[in-house]
Structure formats: structure tokens, C-alpha cells
Amino acid sequence: MGAKRGPGKNLTEDERARLSSEALEKWGRGISKKQIAKELGVSFQTVQSLLRYAAAQIDAEEKVEIRAQIVASIRVVKRRAWDELDRRRAPDRSKGRRANRAPALSSLLLIRCPHFCSASSKPTIGSSGSTA
């Protein structure tokens, strides 16, 4: 059983992290918020605040994971696009000419993802030193 705190006493970050974890674990087992408040020695409102804090921490962790997955997916798409552009840029040996769609595809790639494609990542195909 936690020590009873006086009214208006703020929790430290360590206390908040520890108590929010305990409150979430107890609430997950079906213990009422009133009972959790008694067991932790805090008010009912503090228990609600602790549960919101725990939920926000979980959401933040999930957002980081989701962002990492999105970035990885974008990198795969970029690599495939550059590979396709390189393939199309290579001379067409059967017809003795170069594919002429590569500059258009390159421009499209740079227009569609300007935040992920930079001039330093790979030069624009078909450009003469200028950026599109």
C-alpha cells in the first residue's frame, strides 16, 4: 500500500512513471479506479491522470514504431524507383537506342516525394547540372 500524499502535492517524474505503470497493471486486471487509489495512496482523480499518462506513453511509443515502418517503406520504394530508372537508363541493346522515359520518370519521382529525394541522394537522370 502506497504512502498517503497530502492534497495538492505534485508527483515527481519518477513517481508518476512508477505509479502510472502500477495503476495501468492493476486497472488491466479489472481493479476499480477507487480501489487502485486506495492501494496507491492517491486520489481517484490522480489515478485517472496516471492512466491517461500511461496511455499517452504507449501512444508515443507506437507512433515512433509506425514512423520507423513508414520511413523504411519509403526507402524501399525509392530504391525500387531508382533501380527501375537505372534499368531504363541502360542502353537497349536489342534496338540500339536508350529508353527515353527515364527523364520523365525521374522528374515524376522528384515531384512526388520532394522531402525524401534530395539532390545529394542521387542525380536527376537526363539533367545537365540543373535541378528539376
Image (cartoon, rainbow, N blue to C red):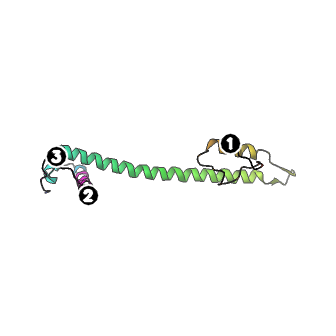
Secondary structure beneath label 1: helix
Quadrant (top left, top right, bottom left, bottom right) of the C terminus: top right
Magenta stretch holds residue 8: yes
Apparent side of residue 71 relative to residue 121 in the rendered image (left or right):
left
> Does label 1 or label 3 sit earlier along the sequence?
3
Magenta stretch holds residue 94: no
Q: Residue at x 21, y 47 (%)?
A: 47
Cα distance in 3D space between marks 3 and 2: 17 Å
Q: Residue at x 35, y 50 (%)?
A: 58
Pointer 1 residue: 108
Residue 15, image quadrant: bottom left
Report crowding for label 2: few under 14, some 14 to 19, many 20 or more residues within 10 A (C-alpha).
Answer: few
Magenta-colored span:
4-25
Front position among marks 1 and 2: 2
Quadrant (top left, top right, bottom left, bottom right) of the N terminus: bottom left
Whole-percent x, y for residue 100 in the image: 80, 45
> Does label 3 or label 2 sit earlier along the sequence?
3
Cα distance in 3D space between marks 1 and 3: 59 Å
Apparent side of residue 77 relative to residue 69 in the rendered image (left or right):
right
Q: Which mark is residue 128?
A: none
Report crowding for label 1: few under 14, some 14 to 19, many 20 or more residues within 10 A (C-alpha).
Answer: few
Cβ atoms under marks 1 and 2 closer than 8 Å: no
Q: Which mark is residue 14?
A: 2
Cβ atoms under marks 3 and 2 closer than 8 Å: no
Q: Which mark is residue 8?
A: 3
Apparent side of residue 7 relative to residue 94 in the rendered image (left or right):
left
Number of disc labels: 3
> Does label 1 or label 2 sit earlier along the sequence?
2
Secondary structure beneath label 3: loop
